[in-house]
Amino acid sequence: MCPFPKEGTTDDYGKIPTWKACPAIMDGFSTGYVLKTPCDIKFFKNSQGIIDVDIAENKYKDFCSKRPPMPQFEHPSGYYKNHFAWFPDWGLELPEGYSALFMTPMNRFDLPFLNTTGVVDNDSVHLLGTFPFFVIDGWEGTIPAGTPYMQILPFKRENWDHELEILSQQDIYYKMVNNMKFYRQPDGGIYKNKIWTRREYK
């Protein structure tokens, strides 16, 4: 649904659209709540050649720490096997019937780490939590204060049923053609102006 022209081309106004032209991608950035690091966090290889972490500010010494490998949990390819965990000094409380999805900030491919993703029933559990994450293999450096490190998406728990509809090749073709005719307009604003609704997280 993103109104991007083909690579190397421009729209009818001679401009190359950015990601801001696509509400679906922008919603990925802005949906839910994004937490930011409270201090600089330095990652380096210690004398044993193992990735390690150091926080200079005593106030936040416990915000991030090393964790041993998790048994029966495959670490992601391209990341150090030894991992770490965020230790925020807060708890989350949601209304009855709501849970929260904790994850790496969406569409932030520039971040040198990857969180494990989890869902917590925070209407019942309000305890402080720890959030394991992996650092890109070969990377050493400092994650500056104010870097987004966690995205939290609250959602209402509901049971779902699904149905499968098998379409013919002709039906699929016509759906694709009609979809392109409706959404692929020169100004790219059909989805944003007629379909999309704004969400607020205060």
Image (cartoon, rainbow, N blue to C red):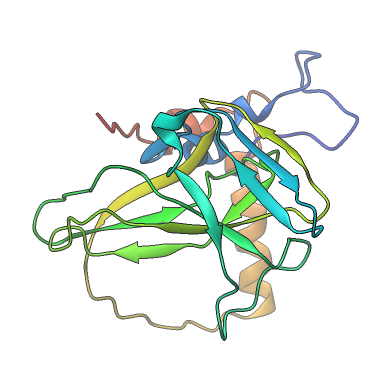
- Considering depth in this image, is 196 or 122 the residue closer to the camera? 122
Q: Give the quadrant of residue 187.
A: top right
Identify which residue is drawn at 52% across, 32% down.
190
Q: Is residue 160 left or right of residue 118?
A: left
Q: Residue 79: x, y in percent?
A: 73, 61
Q: Is residue 108 left or right of residue 32?
A: right
Give above or below for 102 relative to 20. below
| Residue at the right extreme of this rendering | 8
Please identify the quadrant where the N terminus is shown: top right
- Considering depth in this image, is 143 or 94 the residue closer to the camera? 143
Q: Residue 27: x, y in percent?
A: 47, 38
Identify which residue is drawn at 70% across, 25% down.
18
Identify which residue is drawn at 55% across, 45% down.
106
Give the total of numbered labels: 0
| Residue at the front extreme of this rendering | 47
- Considering depth in this image, is 58 or 83 the residue closer to the camera? 58
Q: Give the quadrant of residue 177.
A: bottom right
